Amino acid sequence: MYIIAGLGNPGRKYENTRHNMGFIAVDLLAEKYGIKVDKIKFKALVGEGRIAGQKVLLVKPQTYMNLSGESIREVMSFYKEDIENLIVIYDDIDIPTGTIRLRKKGSAGTHNGMRNIVYLLADDGFPRIRVGIGSDKKVDLINYVTGGVTKGEKELLEGALVKAADAAAAIVEKGIEKAMNEYNIKPKKEKEKND
């Protein structure tokens, strides 16, 4: 079984904020594969279903972002799944708005929700999908990530979230290596015009 966790903050106040990219990606997966994410268990909203014939558990921790690991640890200890079968989707200020990056494993970087997960699982060997939200150096970081999305960002992020959900399904269906080859595409730089 695969456990696909999208990170975010619970409550209407945070619904369409940059920090809720993981929640939105899980909602897109749920919609596409007909999975109801409506049971409260493991300090999370969860729903079981199938993607590409594989059993999956979709998870939206309800602990607030910085304590996401509490929920993920409960899920992992209950199901006793291999760490490689956990996929975490979250926002990342360190990559450009509207891009996604898949990683097989590694450090949590600057993301406090991921830091908490890695710390409480005592393991960073799980795939993750980072949804780029960029950063605004003029705005306080907390206000930026919990702030609403601008019109300019909306279209970029909608495309990235569809890709993030599809990438999660690709990991389930084809494995992390093939999914990385398919989705870790660097944007093409515009060719310089030679006059």
Image (spheres, helix red, strand yellow):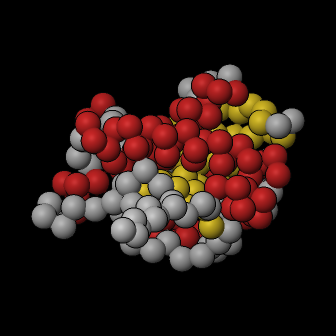
**Front one among 43 and 49:** 49
Which residue ends up furthest to the front in the rendered image? 195
Residue 65 seen from this side: no
Tell me residue 92's x, y (percent). Answer: 42, 61
* Residue extending farthest left: 138
Residue at image point 28% right, 62% down: 135
Work out which quarter of the rendered image holds the C terminus and state it: bottom left
Give the left or right position of residue 126, taking residue 64 as reference: right
Left or right of 53: which side holds 91? left
Q: Residue at x 38, y 37 (%)?
A: 155
Q: Quadrant of residue 166?
A: top right
Q: Nearer the viewer, residue 61 or 110?
A: 110
For residue 83, say whether it is visible.
yes
Looking at the image, residue 74 lies above or below residue 29? below
**Rendered position, 51 above or below 36:** below
Residue at the image position 62 percent from the left and 34 percent from the top? 29
- Percent from the top left, x then y, of residue 75? 65, 51
Total numbered badges shown on the rendered structure: 0
Q: Is residue 140 left or right of residue 43?
A: left
| Residue at 33% from the left image edge and 48% from the top image edge | 18
